Image (tube, rainbow, N blue to C red):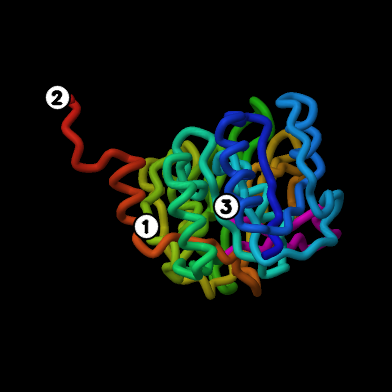
Amino acid sequence: MKIAIFGSKHQKKEQVEKLFGILFDNNTEIYLHEKFYNYLKDVFNLQYDVADIIANDVFDADLAISIGGDGTFLRTASIIGKKNIPVLGINAGRLGFLADVGEKDLEDTFADIFSGNYRIEHRSQLQLSPEHGACHGFNYALNEIAILKQDTASMITVHAHINGEYLTSYEADGLIIATPTGSTAYSLSVGGPVIEPTAANFVITSVAPHSLSNRPLVVTDDCVLTIDVECRNRNFLVSLDGRSGIFGAGAKLTIKKADFTLRVIKRKGNTFYDTLRNKLMWGVDPRQS
């Protein structure tokens, strides 16, 4: 089995050694992302005999491993792109909705993977298309696309249309268009709903709206959203899973469902509802701790 590994600069050495020990014991062919390879070598003095170093987006594998937090998982997803390689998220961070495999579960998780006892979830993504020009880099997002005011500038006005029909003009610090996967990320922090990750929906959530009547809106994921922005300082930010670019006022943006999904590896006994209970501590009475 060919496995590509991507990681962050926030690791526990013991967890990394445990992971590589499991992989080498199962005779896997390991491909290591260049930045992570250098981090392990320079910081932990770990230098593994791997099949190859991934220095660009030209590679192939049977599966990919993201070890870190959800931010690392999102960066891994952008590198995987349209390759259709399934991704497993190992949590070396804090909360971890995407990277949800803990260190204590490594042996059992890989026993399941090597025996084929796992399932694949297909996660929808968003595509951003500017009317003029092109996006720099990967113009897709697994979590969300956020249109935001720049720095400490005045709020922006976001004129939104759905399938050509005028929706409203949001006067706010920004607007978030999130996938079901991203419903537990930025959108949730500004009052958006939790959506089951394989649902055929998107959610539109404003950031600090000027009107209290603005509420999150859930739409079907076959909708096409077109947006143009007014702002006093002539520029605004567009963030795709944290990758930000500056656009000029009046830029017209089209956001729609991407024509491909990200394949996410999940253990058969690990469900989204288990994750909600465990990560958000639903049903836990802190008075009894």
For label 3, the residue is 144
Who comes first in sequence, dot 3 or dot 1?
3
Task: Give, as a three-letter code, the residue at label 2.
Answer: Arg
Task: Give how far apart the Cα atoms at labels 3 and 1 are.
Answer: 24 Å
Task: Give, as a three-letter code, the residue at label 3.
Answer: Glu
Viewer-nearest residue: 37 or 205: 37
Task: Give how far apart the Cα atoms at labels 2 and 1 are.
Answer: 28 Å
For label 2, the residue is 287
Q: Secondary structure beneath disc 3?
A: strand
Q: Which residues are magenta?
A: 125-147
Q: Is residue 128 left or right of residue 217?
A: right
Which label belongs to residue 270? 1
Q: Secondary structure beneath disc 1?
A: loop
Locate residue 195, reporting x and y percent: 38, 58
Q: Is residue 161 left or right of residue 192?
A: right
- Magenta stretch: residue 145 in it? yes
